[in-house]
Amino acid sequence: MSVFRSNTFTHEGINLHYQDAGQGPLIIFYHGFPSFWYSFHHQMAALSGHFHVAAIDGPGINLSDKPTSLVHYQLPSLIAQLNALAEHLASGKRFYLVGHDWGGALAWAFAQSHPDRLHRVVSINAPPANQLVRLLATDSEQRQRSRYMWSMREGKTHQWMTKNGARNLWQQAYAKFRPLHHYTSEDDEIFHKGLAQPGAIDGGINWYRANIPEPDAITDHDYWPSKTAKTSVPAMLIWGEADDTFVPWFIDDLPHYATDLTVRRLAGVGHTPMLEVPEKVNALLLEFFKV
């Protein structure tokens, strides 16, 4: 923890927190839900000897502002915030982008819409945002797996997730890491503290409210940056094969969305490889970034 620097930058009136370390070419790490910057602390420590590493708390998350308007959580705004952070840290220079879950879907969207800004892009256990919307519109199994995207917005599930400083959600989401030798009680408490920040869970849910309509209501307007957008940026998917969040056959179609694609599969690993097998993920990133 001591090697990381805590900082804030402001974009369009929204204060966004990030942690950074090291010097050299910039890598930005973007978390998923329910998490925040600390989900990448292993990767930041491992790569900070070669790169300037930065991990952001997205809007609504942990120490970042939690605006009430959903416009700040919509993909175009998230993309603009991400680009602003890159300009803040490495003005005019290309950078590397790594995202997990929601952050992975966002990373693909950034590579599709701003390919000239990136050296390379990595998604960990996440399809592109426009591919996910297509899956929700057309694939019954993905709809079934994604029921939480709607159930947590209100009612009993929402109450369960948000009450008592998000303790229920913390216990459920992070229980699987506790038997791991590299997952410490300090790690556990840091994750609990991040989820317990006032408004942080609703802030995370706002990403779904802002970008994921009911499947039967999906129109072409809901695909961002477009229904057929793809990227030629060199891209890698790190896929924990025990993932039950996304249907694995999205990978078969992924070359239609990323034309220079590498896929690295991790057998027996679940939805969060960077926390479950950090050394393997670190090695894959170092290899892909040609260190």
Image (cartoon, rainbow, N blue to C red):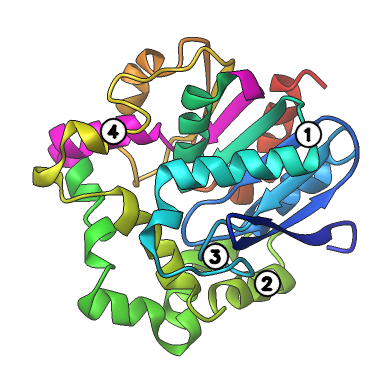
Looking at numbered disc 2 in the image, what kind of residue is underneath it? Ile
Label 4 with label 1: CB-CB less than 8 Å: no
- Whether residue 118 appears in magenta in the rendering, the answer is yes
Asked whether 262 or 96 is in front, the reply is: 96
Tell me where the magenta segment starts and ends, as one range: 116-141
List x then y, in percent, for residue 46. 81, 42
Instruction: Tell me, for residue 182, which label it has, or none.
Output: none
Label whose residue precedes the other's in the sequence (4 or 1): 1
Indicate the quadrant containing the C terminus: top left, top right, bottom left or bottom right. top right
Task: Report helix, strand or loop for mark 1.
Answer: loop
Q: Residue 253 appears in which quarter of the rendering?
A: top left
Q: Mark 3 highlights which residue?
A: 61
Q: Is residue 135 above or below residue 147?
A: above
Q: Mark 2 highlights which residue?
A: 190
Mark 1 packing: few (<14 Cα in 10 Å), some, or many (20+)?
Answer: few
Q: Mark 4 highlights which residue?
A: 223
Looking at numbered disc 1 in the image, what kind of residue is underneath it? Ser
